[in-house]
Image (cartoon, rainbow, N blue to C red):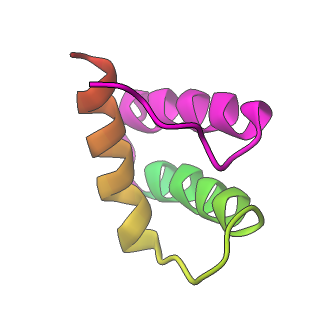
Amino acid sequence: MASSPSIFPPAVVRAFVKRMNDYFSETEPLKRDTIAVLQLRDLESHRKGKLRLDDVRPLFAEMRAHLEQ
């Protein structure tokens, strides 16, 4: 499957992947939520529309599955 160009700057994409890895490495739920909130704020600053914390968690899971293929 061909990938489409990212709507996010490369630095934002790299930060997303780092935070995603941090998120899945963390065992404490509160710290995981903190990581997800940081990512939420970063994504919101680069896209139109509203995101919720419940949008970021599945996004991390989907991207992790995609990267593991």
Front residue of this view, candidates 6 and 52 = 6
> Could you tell whether 10 is left or right of 16 in the image?
right
Name the residue rendered at 69%, 46% in the picture.
8
Residue 42, image x and y in percent? 72, 57
* Quadrant of image for the N terminus: top left
Task: Say which quarter of the image contains residue 54.
Answer: bottom left
Residue 12, image x and y in percent? 72, 40
Magenta span contains residue 28: yes
Q: Is residue 19 above or below residue 34?
A: above
Residue 45, image x and y in percent? 77, 66
Front residue of this view, candidates 29 and 42 = 42
Task: Say which quarter of the image contains residue 16.
Answer: top right
Q: Is residue 44 above or below residue 58?
A: below
Range of residues picked out in magenta = 1-29
Residue 4, image x and y in percent? 48, 37
Magenta span contains residue 16: yes
Front residue of this view, candidates 30 and 11 = 11
Q: Residue furthest top?
A: 69
Name the residue rendered at 47%, 77% in the picture.
52
> Could you tell whether 26 is left or right of 8 in the image?
left
* Quadrant of image for the C terminus: top left
Task: Say which quarter of the image contains residue 44.
Answer: bottom right
